[in-house]
Amino acid sequence: MRRAVGLRAVGLALVAGAALFRGLPARGDPRRAPAVAYTDVTATSGIDFVHSHGGTGRKYYIETVPPGACWLDYDGDGWQDLYIVQSGPLPGTPRDAGSPHARLFRNRGDGTFADVTERAGVANAAGYGNGCTVGDYDNDGDEDLYVTNFGASVLYRNNGDGTFTDVAGTAGVRNGLYATSAAWADYDNDGRLDLFVANYVDFTMDDEKFCGNVKQNRRSYCHPDTYGGLPDALFHNEGNGRFKEVARASGIYDPNGKGLGVVWLDLDADGDVDLYVANDATPNDLYRNEGNGRFTDITLLSGACCSEDGKPQSGMGTDAGDADGDGWPDLFVTNLTNEVNELYHNLRGTGTFSIDTYPAGLGEISLLTSGWGTDLFDYDNDGDLDIVVSNGHPMDDIQLSSDNVTYAQRPFLFQNQGGGKFRDVGQETGAYFRAMEVGRGLATADYDNDGDLDIAFTPNNRRATLLRNDGGNSAGHWITLRLEGVKCNRDAIGARVVVTAGGRRQVEEVRSASSYLSQNDMRLHFGLGAAAKVDAIEIRWPEKPKRTETVGPIAADQFVTIREGGGVVARSAAGNPAPGR
């Protein structure tokens, strides 16, 4: 199906002018990678998680998808904790106390983590888990956790004492379909977080398909085209601990979609969040928020649904961020082998995008890889967004049908060279980026509160990996912001923040989940380069009527909490607990 060919030309015609506006660096003037290394600290960190897809050789389709991970400060002590989703055993397989389950690792603040899953009550022991998202849906000051499953999903309400209670049934958010990614946002700016859940394909365990070589009786994992798609779900927070499913009534409806990745973003800077869904083998969806509780499907007009020739791709993960520094959030989508990971450049909030993949240096390198988790983040603190991608093919026997594609693949770390031009520097930054992995989810956070961003990778059917950023905090100054809503939602999800430092403006938004099945540290991290102070921080809070607040100047290299209407209420230096909840 080709939905994006028609008016995409409108966006493409503006590419040349947009490139001139962005002021791309001169040819022959590439920046050298800074002295930043990513060190694998998994073995000493206490994070001993090994994912199990539960496979028995029957090649059930659900085995290929998970897992994801979420960073959160569940106990409000100022240190980011890590939740990793578990999958196997397969549905219908007996489970016991020794069966693998999801894990919550509490950050001790000394570089190590303790497994607190049993005490916290978040094992998701009955579910075949895929992903997760974090948000304070009841505005009580602590972070709640939603876990997506194949089948009924789980909402863990944080009790504020280190424990959680599953309230998905009474809240009305079990979903019951093949859920993958999910993300919190206050789409109607009523002060309460709503929940979007991406549903994938109409697969059931008792409708097993044989895919592979029949003559050899060799099973392979099926292609997503084997199964029909599913509509996604949007749960509106009614404010009484309950939610109402309103997706179709609000204009969010794609019955053929096969959702895997999701990100909320304010694509047109009008003060309400829009929704982007990465679909597998069907066109991606882009819904513009009209500000009245309804959305308009602008997929056809946006140019952000498909490849450059208008064909749907195998959308896996996605993220939004200002890749070229022009103040508008762009979209990045990871895709399957023989496609490319696409960078859609936002044409200044018009609702249209140009495809900048090859001009940005992101095309050819991704042709033979299958991308999944991703994040636009500033790993070297130079003031522009870099890109990390986890790679790995979904078929564990791909080598039988391909001479140049492997099952395990090395991840990418693309350094922004300025103006939205990228170069893969991963192999220069650490052994993990030179190793072959069956990548799926990833999530970034400053888990050691030292002023640079670390990465958790969650491969399929393998051990999770924690990479510590060594050197990012000396490569450039930084500031990390935690926003606290009063009238708006407590997490201030949807807030738009403009930081001005050293004559440069950076724009970011507070988000919950993105990447693939995962969620990053919700605190906003800004690399400042040589700027030793921030001149101004302008915050547009996500509420009605719109409210803007400005604070500053403020010194760099610290963690700062800003409360709506109250300015800076707490701060701490690197190496200390960040101001907690």
Image: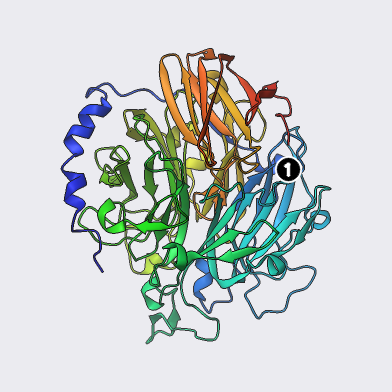
In-image side of 550 versus 558 (left or right)? left
- Amino acid type, label 1: Gly
The answer to whether residue 61 is above or below residue 458 is below
Q: Where is residue 132 in the image (x, y as percent from the top left)?
A: 60, 56
Instruction: Classify mark 1: residues with Cα within 10 Å, few (<14), some (14-19) or many (20+).
Output: some
Q: Is residue 506 left or right of residue 443?
A: left
SS for dot 1: loop
- Estimate the x, y position of residue 41 in percent, counting from the top left: 65, 38
Q: Nearer the viewer, residue 301 or 323?
A: 301
One can see residue 88 in this view: yes
Q: Quadrant of residue 327?
A: top left
Q: Place residue 397 in its image quadrant.
A: bottom left
Residue 274 is situated, as x and y percent measured from the top left of the image, at 43, 49
Q: Which quadrant of the rendered structure holds the C terminus?
A: top right
In screen coordinates, is 95 left or right of 334? right
Q: Nearest the camera: 194 or 164?
A: 194
Q: Which of 315 and 3 is in front in this view?
A: 3
User: Residue at coordinates 55% horizontally, 50% vertically from top-left?
Assistant: 185
Q: Position of residue 110 (x, y in %)?
A: 76, 32
Q: Which residue is drawn at 66% across and 37% down?
A: 486
Task: For residue 285, say whether it is visible.
Answer: no
Location of residue 394 by image quarter: bottom left
- Where does the N terminus fall, quadrant-wise? bottom left
Q: What's the image's color scheme?
A: rainbow
| Pointer 1 residue | 141
